[in-house]
Amino acid sequence: MNETPIDLDRHRGMAAQKATDIRRVLAEVETNTRLLRDRQGVVELQLLAVPAATWSEAVAKARYVLNLYSAGLAPTDTHHRDLVTAVLADLTRLSGDDT
């Protein structure tokens, strides 16, 4: 038995190699997306389970929700995007936070 791996890509055409590369990247992206969704679910359960004990915790929750909302807005919905930006700026200014 030969221990040296065979480079199968050498025996295929360029189009087949590119198609394989694309499939691998898409599978990796899908896996990463699934992991991010799972983590997001955990964070959201924690945000729901524990009420904010301070104004800064309430501001952090509000920022999270506003960022979720703005991520779902159409790129052309500049009015609502501007509104979210203004509210986030108000939260930052009023909380004394520079984040």
Image (spheres, rainbow, N blue to C red):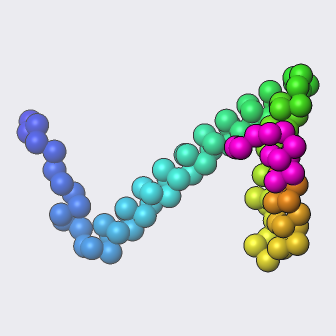
User: At 89% across and 31% down in the image, what residue appears?
Assistant: 55
Of residues 68 and 62, the one drawn nearer to the viewer in this rendering: 62
What x and y, as percent, mark residue 5? 16, 45
Asked whether, in this view, residue 22 is left or right of residue 57, the answer is left
| Quadrant location, the N terminus | top left
- Examine the image and state in which quarter residue 24 appears: bottom left
User: At 25% across and 73% down in the image, what residue appears?
Assistant: 13
With respect to residue 41, does 77 lie above or below?
below
The range drawn in magenta is 89-99
What x and y, as percent, mark residue 68? 79, 51
User: At 88% across and 67% down in the image, what residue appears?
Assistant: 80
With respect to residue 2, does 24 lie above or below?
below
Most common SS among magenta residues: helix
Residue lying furthest left: 2
Looking at the image, how many numbered discs can be counted on the residues?
A: 0
User: At 89% across and 22% down in the image, what residue appears?
Assistant: 53
Of residues 83 and 38, the one drawn nearer to the viewer in this rendering: 83
Task: Kindly tell me whether residue 34 is visible in this rendering.
Answer: yes
Task: Kindly tell me whether residue 69 is visible in this rendering.
Answer: no
- Examine the image and state in which quarter residue 36 appears: top right
What x and y, as percent, mark residue 34? 62, 44
Residue lying furthest bottom: 76
Q: Does the magenta stretch include residue 51?
A: no
| Quadrant location, the C terminus | top right
With respect to residue 38, does 52 lie above or below?
above
What x and y, as percent, mark residue 65? 84, 46
